[in-house]
Image (spheres, grey):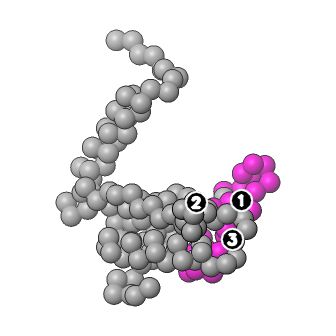
Amino acid sequence: MKFRIAKELNESYKSHVNNKLYEYNLRHFPEDLRGRYKEVNLILLDENDQVRGGILGEVCWNWLEIHTLMIDEDLRGSGYGTELLVEIERAALESECDFIKVDTLSFQALDFYQNNGYEVYGTLDNVGKEFKHFYLKKDILRGESL
């Protein structure tokens, strides 16, 4: 049998690969964590319903992962990022997550996350030749109110 490696953007192939990995992972996770996946997207809108920021994440098994947190530059430092973070942490609690994870680059929001209780658990140097990539985690304490 011969094989070839295809380099193409094909949604069907991509879906197949993701589904096969998901099926494999399911066989190794405890029964009570199976099927625990949902997107959590919170959007900051102004009075004209214009998007001024947002936080995009997903609950996966026993954690919530933040993929994107963005606030328009003219609003940064005004507390909206913290409000979004508190709301997604509330969603993690409601979804019975054990922790939240996020990553950020050295020129982005490291101090912001650390000031909100996130701890660095890993780094990569030489990102973009001059930056660091930080991986952070915050444990969610059940029974804690935000």
Name the residue at 39% across, 72% down: 91
User: What residue is pinned by disc 3?
Assistant: 75
Farthest residue toward the right? 130
Kindly report the distance in space between the C-alpha atoms of the residues bearing marks 2 and 1: 32 Å
80 falls in the magenta region = no
Q: Amino acid at mark 3?
A: Leu
User: Which image quarter holds the C terminus?
Assistant: bottom left
Residue 33 makes an appearance in the image: yes
Instruction: Decide: few, some or many residues near mark 3? Use Cα within 10 Å; few <14, some 14-19, many ≥20.
Output: few
Q: Reading the chain from its start, which is encountered first: label 1 or label 3? A: 3
Disc number placed over residue 104 in the picture, else none: none
Q: Judge from the rendering whether residue 51 lies leftward or rightward of residue 90; answer left or right.
A: right
In the orientation shown, which residue stands out farthest toward the top? 1
The residue labelled by disc 2 is 50
**Secondary structure found at label 3:** helix
Which sits in the foreground, 53 or 106? 53
Which residue position is annotated with label 1?
A: 132
- Where in the figure is residue 76, as x and y percent of width and height? 69, 71
- Mark 1 in CB contact with mark 3 (< 8 angstroms): no
Q: CA distance from mark 2 to mark 3?
A: 13 Å
Crowding at dot 2, Cα within 10 Å, few <14 / some 14-19 / many 20+, comes out as: few
Quarter of the view holding residue 1: top left
Q: Note whether 94 is above or below 126 in the view shown.
A: below
Depicted 143 relative to depicted 90: above or below: below
From which residue to which does the magenta span run?
103-132
Q: Which numbered disc, 2 or 1, marks the residue that appears first in the sequence?
A: 2
The kind of secondary structure element at disc 2 is loop
Q: Secondary structure at mark 1?
A: strand
- Percent position (x, y) of residue 55? 52, 63
Q: Earlier in the sequence, mark 2 or mark 3?
A: 2
